[in-house]
Amino acid sequence: MKKHLNTLFVTTEGAYLAKAGDAVAVRIEKKTRLRVPLINLDGIVCFGRVACSPALLAHCAANGVSVTYLSRNGRFLAAVNGFTSGNVLLRREQYRAADDPERSALIARCCVTGKIANCRTLLRRCARETRDADAVARLNRAADRLSSLLALLDEDRELDVVRGFEGEAATSYFRVFDDLIRTEKDVFTFSGRNRRPPTDPVNALLSFAYTLLMHDVRSACESTGLDSAVGFLHRDRPGRPGLALDLMEELRPVIADRVVLNLINRRQIKKEDFVFQPNGAVKLTDKGRKTFLYEYQQRRNEPVVHPFLGEKMTIGFVPLIQARLLARFLRGDLDAYPPFAWK
């Protein structure tokens, strides 16, 4: 079974990370609290005021270990990825495809197909686990609507039409997202997506989950030799990782949304794990963030059989596989990009 390497999440303010032989040493108040072999890591994520030594950054850059800096609340600040692997020919093909409306529409259609199919799978799974008959009916109707959109996507479509279908699917999916939540409805209710800042616990969890997933997908693009900024579904915008957002779409329900629902429905996260600020913003506490990171890592460690390759791997390995499959399509080795279809 193919396994992904681990990600080291550092959430303690004032922590200092240094290279100690073949390991990264996490020092807090000048005392080494943790040592992790660098050979076991594919990424380091630092929250808030966390510093890394130049020697550690140099080693990570040279060995493909991404280092990502986020604010305490999970907002992306910067990333160190080192020299991009692959070759210039792959990126040239990516840029040509991005400038070609037909090829862009084909790739976007595949990404959106994967997203809608996986959202439908999550809705149907949760409908089987729900005892509320009205909720089951709403979930099944939403799943049927997603099936209708998938049928429409089977035909060749222009890029703007594909984007329209993606938006309609997202609306149908989030309209019934509250029915996926089965416990503590006085705390965890969902009336719609909001962010920057999130104003309720569910949206706070979703935003944090998508930040972590973005780190994984962005690192996968860079390590494959793709330009994470140049996408097909998402238009170019300065500072926006368009390709990473494209490849994220099919994985949102599989990884991020599933982690959020598991935490809530299994009562692993509670009201006291959030800070409710005077301006209406809702953020995770340090304890809540650590609980979330543990569950996220557990989800990444779960085994899955890749539907296209037929190989067993951990879910955390899927972003890298999808980036490589896209690269194979861009090089002409595949007729179309095969999205990850969750069963």
Image (cartoon, rainbow, N blue to C red):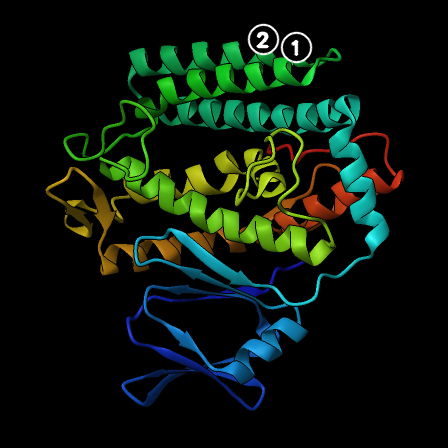
Residue under the point 49% across and 42% down:
255
Instruction: Mark yes or no: residue 337 visible.
Output: no
Identity, as a three-letter code, of the amino acid under mark 2? Ser
Q: Which mark is residue 151?
A: 1
Residue 325 occupies quadrant: top right
Residue 198 occupies quadrant: top left
Rendering coords of residue 8 (x, y %)? 46, 68
Rendering coords of residue 115 (x, y %)? 57, 28
Rendering coords of residue 166 (x, y %)? 55, 20
- For disc 1, the neighbor class at 10 Å (few under 14, some 14 to 19, many from 20) is few
Q: Secondary structure at mark 1?
A: helix
Q: Are marks 2 and 1 in contact (CB under 8 Å)?
A: yes
- Placement of the N terminus among the 4 image quadrants: bottom right
Residue where numbered disc 2 is placed: 148
Please indicate whether residue 271 sits to the left or right of residue 337 in the image: left
Residue occupying the far front of the picture: 238
Instruction: Mark yes or no: residue 135 visible.
Output: yes
Q: Which mark is residue 172?
A: none
Residue 126 occupies quadrant: top left
- Placement of the C terminus among the 4 image quadrants: top right
Residue under the point 86% across and 30% down:
335
